[in-house]
């Protein structure tokens, strides 16, 4: 189930990078919908890992995890109508154990941010999460932006599963084992991001449940993609600071209060 690319620096630390959408062009998604695309053809797009250029810190290994489910994507949660969270988490634990990692960080943007957050909360071997513009309500996002391809994720209508996955971060079952209590979370979002309100609400919900949770808000009205693309250097600096257990110094980063920062942007 777990597929991806490992960059091995012989480190006891691991950074797991979950992939965003956009790996597969729309015309290929159309072919998948019509059952005209081979699995091998689609696999090549998943192997074009985003954030590969960020993997420059020799003090950590990097695992780029593919989201090749439902013949397309699965938000690391669903494979053609099947909930895969428990199985995926189990295999993730096995990978970490087999490689004897002592510290594990999850990172990702967009649906990758969703995956990084979900397994960061669920897996006791992961203690730090850096989630960039995640979809807190993934089905809401699918309905708005990928409704044309929804039958790939849900071949048969299943409103119960849809609701379960859309509300996954508020499900008490996610927190019943207490694995989240030692988790440190960093969110990066922007005023113009499509799910800014959802992220802010979740930050208020989760902050008392985890070890600590910090949200960094971009001051601009830039939308979902530009708020990330225009600030790659900042995102990289923060990720590397987390990997090295350092604090980040940035003249555009303003602390408003505990757990709340503003990133000044044009």
Image (cartoon, helix red, strand yellow):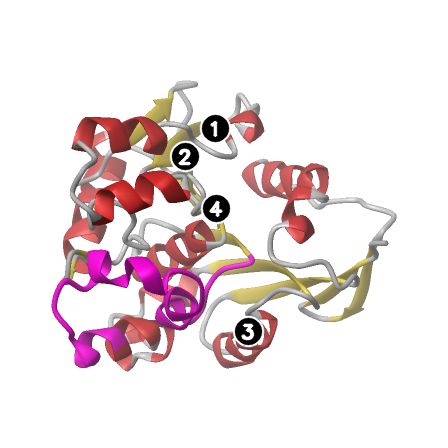
- Marks 3/4: CA–CA distance: 17 Å
Q: Can residue 77 be seen in this view?
A: yes
Horizontal placement of 255 versus 34: left or right? right
What is the CA distance from the residue labelled 1 to the residue labelled 2? Answer: 5 Å
Q: Which of marks 1 and 3 is nearer the N terminus?
A: 1
Which residue in the structure is indicated by mark 1?
Answer: 60
Q: Provide the secondary structure element on which disc 4 rests.
A: strand
Going from the N terminus, do you reach mark 1 or mark 4 first?
A: 1
Tag in front: 3 or 2 = 3
Q: Nearer the viewer, residue 89 or 22?
A: 22
Report the mark closest to the observer, 1 or 4. 4
Q: How far apart are marks 3 and 2 (CA)?
A: 25 Å
**Which residue occupies 44% across, 62% down?**
145
Q: Residue 203 carries which label?
A: 3
Q: Is residue 173 visible?
A: no
Q: Count the marks: how many?
A: 4
Q: Marks 1 and 4, how far apart in space?
A: 13 Å
In the image, residue 20 lies at what x, y percent? 44, 46
Q: In the rendered structure, does residue 159 fall within the stretch colored magenta?
A: yes
> On the image, numbered disc 2 is attached to which residue?
14
Q: Are marks 4 and 2 in contact (CB under 8 Å)?
A: no
Q: Residues within 10 Å of mark 4 (few under 14, many from 20)?
A: many
x, y percentage for residue 26?
40, 44
Question: Residues in magenta?
Answer: 133-162
- Tell me, yes or no, whether the two marked residues, 3 and 2, touch with CB atoms within 8 Å: no
At x 67%, y 49%, the residue is: 226
Image position of 183 (left or right of 154):
right
């Amino acid at each position: 189930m777990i597929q991806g690319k490992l960059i091995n620096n012989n480190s006891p630390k691991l950074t797991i990078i979950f992939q965003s959408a956009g790996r597969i062009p729309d015309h290929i998604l159309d072919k998948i919908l019509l059952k005209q695309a081979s699995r091998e053809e689609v696999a090549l797009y998943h192997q074009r890992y985003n954030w590969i250029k960020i993997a420059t810190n020799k003090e950590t290994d990097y695992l780029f995890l593919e989201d090749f489910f439902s013949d397309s994507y699965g938000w690391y949660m669903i494979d053609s109508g099947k909930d895969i969270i428990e199985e995926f988490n189990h295999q993730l634990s096995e990978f970490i154990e087999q490689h004897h990692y002592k510290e594990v960080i999850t990172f990702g943007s967009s649906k990758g941010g969703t995956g990084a957050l979900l397994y960061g909360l669920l897996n006791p071997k992961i203690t730090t999460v850096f989630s960039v513009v995640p979809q807190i309500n993934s089905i809401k996002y699918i309905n708005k932006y990928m409704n044309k391809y929804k039958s790939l994720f849900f071949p048969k209508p299943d409103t119960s599963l849809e609701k379960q996955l859309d509300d996954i971060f508020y499900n008490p079952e996610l927190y019943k084992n207490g694995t989240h209590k030692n988790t440190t979370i960093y969110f990066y979002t922007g005023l113009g991001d499509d799910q800014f309100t959802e992220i802010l609400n979740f930050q208020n919900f989760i902050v008392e449940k985890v070890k600590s949770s910090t949200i960094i808000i971009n001051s601009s009205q830039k939308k979902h993609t530009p708020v990330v693309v225009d600030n790659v250097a900042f995102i990289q600096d923060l990720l590397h600071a987390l990997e090295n257990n350092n604090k980040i110094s940035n003249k555009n980063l303003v602390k408003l209060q505990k757990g709340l920062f503003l990133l000044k942007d044009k």
